[in-house]
């Protein structure tokens, strides 16, 4: 393992982890909201937001699938050292998947859970250049009336929502920004 893997974790683990987890839960509970998440300093090209999410959500029982651009020694060593999570080559084994939208296609390759265990699905962390509060109209749990969020492909997310209670959950990250669309969220153009 290289020395770069030993740095970039949380300075104050308990506090940073609690803050990161809270940020993730806040955006998941209020789809369409853009929040801030920080604490990790992962190696490039992994963003601060995505790296912090991995530190608070992943452990040795959560295999991570990485897009090809993220499959660097630096990124993989960093994830393994700070989370203990295994890196999987198989989308079918992934508890988490991370990459740009196009790198995650087709999302149908990722597990959506089973009727008995809908929680055994993949959570996708989509790395974006920016997050915007204009775009698709969102409705559903956690949204008072409607919310809006710029998303890469409304039709794909609509298809995912139609699978409920099965389906994928999505986090979108850009730098230190984070947003989420759980499978319960309905989208309109």
Image (spheres, rainbow, N blue to C red):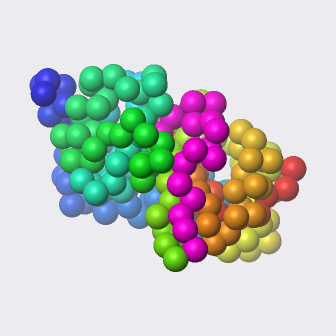
Note whether residue 136 is visible: yes
Q: What percent of the width, then of the height, locates residue 22?
A: 41, 64
Residue 166 % position (x, y)? 61, 66
Judge from the rendering whether residue 1 lies leftward or rightward of residue 85; answer left or right: left
Q: Position of residue 188 (x, y in %)?
A: 85, 56
Instruction: Give yes or no for residue 25 being in the magenta stretch.
Output: no
Q: Considering depth in this image, is 132 or 104 the residue closer to the camera?
A: 104
- Location of the N terminus (image quadrant): top left
Q: Which residues are magenta?
A: 98-115
Q: Indicate left or right for 186 with 57 as reference.
A: right
What is the tally of numbered marks visible in this picture? Answer: 0
Q: Residue at x 62, y 61 (%)?
A: 167
- Residue 125 placed where, x, y %? 51, 45
Location of residue 92 with respect to 44 vertically, above or below: below
Write the residue at 27% across / 23% down.
Answer: 73
Residue lying at 14% horizontally and 34% vertically, measured from the top left: 6
Residue extending furthest toward the right: 189
């Amino acid at each position: 393992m290289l020395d770069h893997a030993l740095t970039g974790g949380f300075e104050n683990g308990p506090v940073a982890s609690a803050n990161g987890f809270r940020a993730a839960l806040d955006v998941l509970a209020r789809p369409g909201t853009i929040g801030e998440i920080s604490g990790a300093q992962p190696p490039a090209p992994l963003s601060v937001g995505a790296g912090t999410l991995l530190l608070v959500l992943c452990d040795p029982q959560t295999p991570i699938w990485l897009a090809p651009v993220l499959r660097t020694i630096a990124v993989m060593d960093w994830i393994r050292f700070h989370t203990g999570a295994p890196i999987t080559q198989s989308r079918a084994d992934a508890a988490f998947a991370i990459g740009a939208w196009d790198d995650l296609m087709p999302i149908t390759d990722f597990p959506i859970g089973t009727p008995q265990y809908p929680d055994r699905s993949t959570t996708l962390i989509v790395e974006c250049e920016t997050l915007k509060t204009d775009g698709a109209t969102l409705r559903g749990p956690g949204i008072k009336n409607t919310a809006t969020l710029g998303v890469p492909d409304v039709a794909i997310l609509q298809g995912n929502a139609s699978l409920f209670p099965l389906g994928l959950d999505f986090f979108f990250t850009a730098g230190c920004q984070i947003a989420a669309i759980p499978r319960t969220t309905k989208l309109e153009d």
